[in-house]
Image: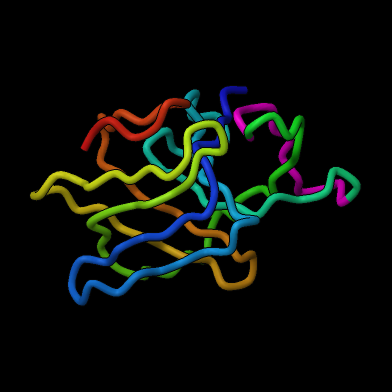
């Protein structure tokens, strides 16, 4: 399974009104490079879970700044609500500090939330380049 985290302390700058969506530090950007659990160009923002919570928890071994193995709540499969178009994502990598990615103009980058599971989904266009090092394209 190729699930990695890019960082936490996530914020999204929305396109139309410039509002910012700030998420708690316990939420981490997660990608599935293999596309096994969710679409490869969807970036999930998921809360860290205790392994003791069991069912519905995704074991994760990745870059969390030396904090060791943790677990994420699995993202829901449906019921997503559109929040808006995103111009920029800001986040913190424990090993590198604050990071940001300004998305190229002309690409619709949509943000969705799931109210009952407190999960967020950033939808990038097909052919996106995002990996364990961060966002590359668009």
- Relative horizontal placement of residue 23, taking residue 104 as reference (left or right): right
Q: Is residue 35 magenta?
A: no
- Relative horizontal placement of residue 14, taking residue 24 as reference (left or right): left
What is the residue that sits farthest to the left in this orientation?
Answer: 106
Looking at the figure, which quarter contains the N terminus?
Answer: top right
Q: Quadrant of residue 25?
A: bottom right
Q: Is residue 24 above or below residue 71?
A: below
Residue at image location 63% in from the left, 71% down from the top: 116
Instruction: Please provide percent x and percent y for residue 107.
Output: 15, 48
Residue closest to the eye, 136 or 100: 100
Residue at image location 21% in from the left, 77% down from the top: 17
What is the residue that sits farthest to the front in this orientation?
Answer: 97
Q: Is residue 62 magenta?
A: yes
Q: Is residue 75 above or below residue 86?
A: above
Q: Is residue 21 above or below residue 77?
A: below
Instruction: Please provide percent x and percent y for residue 54.
Output: 86, 46
- Relative horizontal placement of residue 38, taking residue 98 as reference (left or right): right
Instruction: Please provide percent x and percent y for residue 106.
Output: 8, 49
Total number of numbered discs in the rendering: 0
The colour scheme used here is: rainbow
Looking at the figure, which quarter contains the C terminus?
Answer: top left
Give, as a single range, the part of the protein colored magenta.
Answer: 53-64
Residue at image location 47% in from the left, 55% down from the top: 10
Q: Quadrant of residue 60?
A: top right
Residue at image location 58% in from the left, 63% down from the top: 24
Instruction: Please provide percent x and percent y for residue 73.
Output: 70, 50
What is the residue that sits farthest to the right in this orientation?
Answer: 52
- Relative horizontal placement of residue 74, taking residue 20 as reference (left or right): right
């Amino acid at each position: 399974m190729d699930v990695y985290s890019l960082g936490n302390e996530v914020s999204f700058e929305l396109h139309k009104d410039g509002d910012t969506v700030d998420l708690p530090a316990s939420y981490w950007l997660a990608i599935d490079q293999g596309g096994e659990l969710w679409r490869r160009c969807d970036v999930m923002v998921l809360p860290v879970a205790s392994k003791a919570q069991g069912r519905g928890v995704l074991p994760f071994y990745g870059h969390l700044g030396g904090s060791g193995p943790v677990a994420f709540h699995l993202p829901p499969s449906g019921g997503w609500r559109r929040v808006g178009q995103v111009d920029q994502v800001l986040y913190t990598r424990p090993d590198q500090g604050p990071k940001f990615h300004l998305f190229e103009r002309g690409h619709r980058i949509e943000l969705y939330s799931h109210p009952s599971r407190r999960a967020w989904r950033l939808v990038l266009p097909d052919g996106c380049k995002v990996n364990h090092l961060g966002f590359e394209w668009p």
